[in-house]
Amino acid sequence: FHFIFYSLKVEFNFSLERCKQGEMNMNKLIKAFLTCTIIFLAGCNLFPEKSKKPVIYLYPENTTEVDVKVNLDGKFTTTYPKYNDGWNVVAEPDGTLHVLDHKNLYYCLFWEGVVNYTPDFSTGFVVEGAKTEAFLEEALTKLGLNDRERNEFIIYWLPYMQGNAYNLISFQNENYTDHAELDISPKPDTVIRVMMAWKPLQESIMIQPQKLDSVERKGFTVVEWGGTEYK
């Protein structure tokens, strides 16, 4: 960031000096200034992408009171039920959640927000828009999502993706989870976190295929899925 700012400052000062020496008119100076400003603002990432619809499912082996916190490097924009300083719920083995401060029932914990992390597109998949549904069915099954979780993921994201010529898709790992840590008590036996970063493409590109590791559910299982579209 500081390097970008310094480089643009040098470039603008050089243009200003040329203007003083009669080598550049004022219109060209203004154009140089605007160009530097646009480049600077583009590097600032003033409008970071939002991680959409991360939802958390809890599947204890027995009815269990569970505390859930998301230690977010960023800020929440929406939570449901209300997050406060975390969620305190009673979870049933089928995933039904009872929030302790009222009588409503839930099947998941929802949050949405801006996470300060850089997506990794060094590996991934380029998928034709029309084939996105089939791809997600296969990939999400391998990543450990059950029928309901997989269906909800596809129902949410497919309308944004199937009409594109191609989609670049990469499932994020530590570069995401280190910036949105789950703090759950009691500690789960299995944690499955699926965060999809993706971009719409007009043409296919070459990319190293991503290896997807399958996860076996054992004991108290926690599942989270979400995604972010990058332009």
Image (cartoon, rainbow, N blue to C red):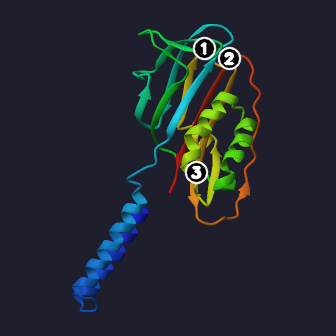
- Considering only vertical position in the picture, is 62 above or below 145? above
Q: Residues within 10 Å of mark 1 (few under 14, many from 20)?
A: few
Mark nearer the viewer, 1 or 3: 3
Residue 36, given in percent of the width and then of the height, sits at 35, 71
Q: CA distance from mark 1 to mark 3?
A: 37 Å
Quadrant of the drawing holding the N terminus: bottom left
Q: Residue at x 22, y 84 (%)?
A: 26
Within the image, what quadrant is residue 186 found in?
top right
Numbered label attached to residue 220: 2
Question: Horizontal placement of 39 versus 34: left or right?
Answer: right
Q: Are marks 2 and 1 in contact (CB under 8 Å)?
A: yes
Numbered label attached to residue 186: 1
- Considering only vertical position in the picture, is 222 above or below 178? above
- Considering only vertical position in the picture, is 230 above or below 149? below
Q: Residue at x 22, y 86 (%)?
A: 20
Q: Residues within 10 Å of mark 3 (few under 14, many from 20)?
A: many
Q: CA distance from mark 2 to mark 1?
A: 9 Å
Secondary structure beneath dot 3 equals helix
Residue 23, given in percent of the width and then of the height, sits at 28, 92
Badge 1 amino acid: Pro
Badge 3 amino acid: Met
Q: Tag 3 or tag 2, which sits nearer the N-term?
A: 3
Residue 71, given in percent of the width and then of the height, sits at 49, 30
Q: Tag 3 or tag 1, which sits nearer the N-term?
A: 3
The residue pinned by badge 3 equals 161
- Considering only vertical position in the picture, is 121 above or below 158? below
Q: CA distance from mark 2 to mark 3?
A: 33 Å
Secondary structure beneath dot 2 equals loop
User: Can you see residue 1?
Assistant: no
Badge 2 amino acid: Phe
Q: Are marks 2 and 3 in contact (CB under 8 Å)?
A: no
- Residue closest to the eye, 64 or 5: 64
